[in-house]
Amino acid sequence: MNAVELKDVEDAELIIAVLAGNLKAFDELVFRYQRAMLTVAQQIVRNPADAEDIVQDAFLLAFEALPQLENLERFGSWLYSITRNRALRFMKKAKRIQLHEDEDAELQIQANPASTDPAQIIERQSTQQIVQDAITSLPSEFQEVIKLYYWVEMPQKRIAEFLSLPLTTVKWRLHKAKDLLKSLLEKRGYENVL
């Protein structure tokens, strides 16, 4: 399988290819899930560098344990569990259980500045911070789906697989997260931010 062919292959087929010795297939799996795993890790550890280390460690563990994966269709949720457990273990080991405010610029809504006018740039950054603060006020299950959908740009079906949830639950959480976010921003006096 070449790189173009790999993009259209289901996870289960890629796993079989990896088990047969095709490392390019594992590269494709890494490409598909890396941003989502970073989002999960960063939500727990709040430090981009630590999250990257955790994700790298999680991929290594997954690669080594891949022959033991019984249900190939659940690869995404299996990766999610590994990542989440590694991040929680990191936090426990580092004695940093209390969550801190998210300082990760990669998770902030990215805007492509239309101009170099400093006032517009500052206003855009301020809006991004307002939305980021509101999102961090949401319950974690809503934060998770909204970040995976909008920042990681993961399709709803893959989010469902990744989080081991029914697709209808992901759709509901995404809808509810948007409603909660809109309501929260309105309460804070930011009716026209979204």
Image: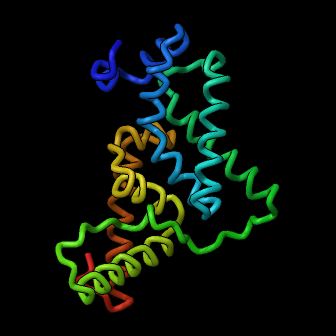
Picture quadrant of residue 5: top left
Asked whether, in this view, residue 5 is left or right of residue 56, the answer is: left
Locate residue 93, reporting x and y percent: 82, 55
Picture quadrant of residue 145: bottom left
Q: Nearer the viewer, residue 34 or 99?
A: 34
Vertical comparison of 104 with 192: above or below? above
Vertical comparison of 121 with 178: above or below? below
Looking at the figure, which quarter contains the N terminus?
A: top left
What residue is drawn where x is 32% and y is 60%?
175
Vertical comparison of 72 with 82: above or below? above
Looking at the figure, which quarter contains the C terminus?
A: bottom left
Q: Nearer the viewer, residue 184 or 51?
A: 51
Locate residue 77, reporting x and y percent: 53, 36
Locate residue 182, reporting x and y percent: 32, 76
What residue is drawn where x is 44% and y is 19%?
14
Locate residue 78, reporting x and y percent: 58, 33
Vertical comparison of 26 with 41: above or below? above
Asked whether, in this view, residue 53 is left or right of residue 2, the answer is: right
What residue is drawn where x is 58% and y is 50%?
52
What residue is drawn where x is 37% and y is 22%?
10
